Amino acid sequence: MNVERFFQIVNLLLPSGMSLYARLQKQSGEVISERTLYARTDADFQTVIDQDPTPGGNTP
Amino acid sequence: MTKHIALVATLLVVLTGCPKRTVVNEAGATLSGPRIDMALALSEMAADQVELAGAVNALQDGGALSQERADRIRELNADVARFGQVVNRALADRSDDQTVLDAVATLQTAAESMVQLLPEGQVTRTIGAAVIGALQTILNAAEQLPGDVSYERGTILPDRQSLAA
């Protein structure tokens, strides 16, 4: 792997890494209502489901 | 260089595995217990999966991931999300312990299948590890619930598994 390729990968990783770190900072010490927690989780899962290129693949 | 990438990956897993949040009810009282632990870990898993989806998009846009492989990850990611959503809704609906445990069992199978089937790559491996880390927290909390988990490992996702074969 050459240097250029390395930095290309790092640049791809950084946004994800920074986003994860920002999420941690935001959540640390956060007080959240039970209802909001469930709603947020459901919305996150739905975001992922909506990106399925073959919708309805494996349904529970 | 691979070591640097591995270091970043490990750091991300450690960082995402240790959030501390307080869950309160409508009266403002702090809630605790295995169901809340599961809900928090499930929230982490969902957020990790959103990160994975974003990373896949970025990798594909950057030319580091083919359309086929990117779609494959999206499919697997969505499969796990569907099962995760079932667990989340069971918790939100105050379903009985056995219903929650059965949902957790299928989520476990789906998540483990996803991680095994994820195409090779640092990003997918990193976030896959984060998902499994959240899953472990969910399973630990599930052990605190009474009830019996009965399911057959490997019976979920037959179509997707055969696709990968």
Image (cartoon, coloured by chain):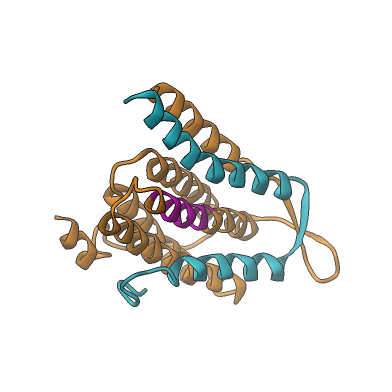
Residue B93 or B14: which is nearer the viewer? B14
Q: Quadrant of the N terminus of chain A?
A: top left
Characterize the magenta stretch by its predominant secondary structure: helix
Left or right: where does residue A13 sit relative to residue A33? left
Residue lying farthest right? Answer: B27
Note whether B20 is above or below A4 in the view shown.
Answer: below
Does B153 lie within the magenta span? no
Q: Colour of chain B?
A: orange
Residue at screen point 28% across, 47% down: B119
Residue at screen point 58% across, 70% down: A43
Q: Colour of chain A?
A: cyan
Q: Quadrant of residue A49?
A: bottom left
Q: Position of residue A7 (x, y in %)?
A: 45, 31
Residue B26 or B102: which is nearer the viewer? B26
Residue at screen point 42% across, 42% down: B123
Range of residues picked out in magenta: B48-59
Does B50 lie within the magenta span? yes
Q: Position of residue A31 (x, y in %)?
A: 79, 56
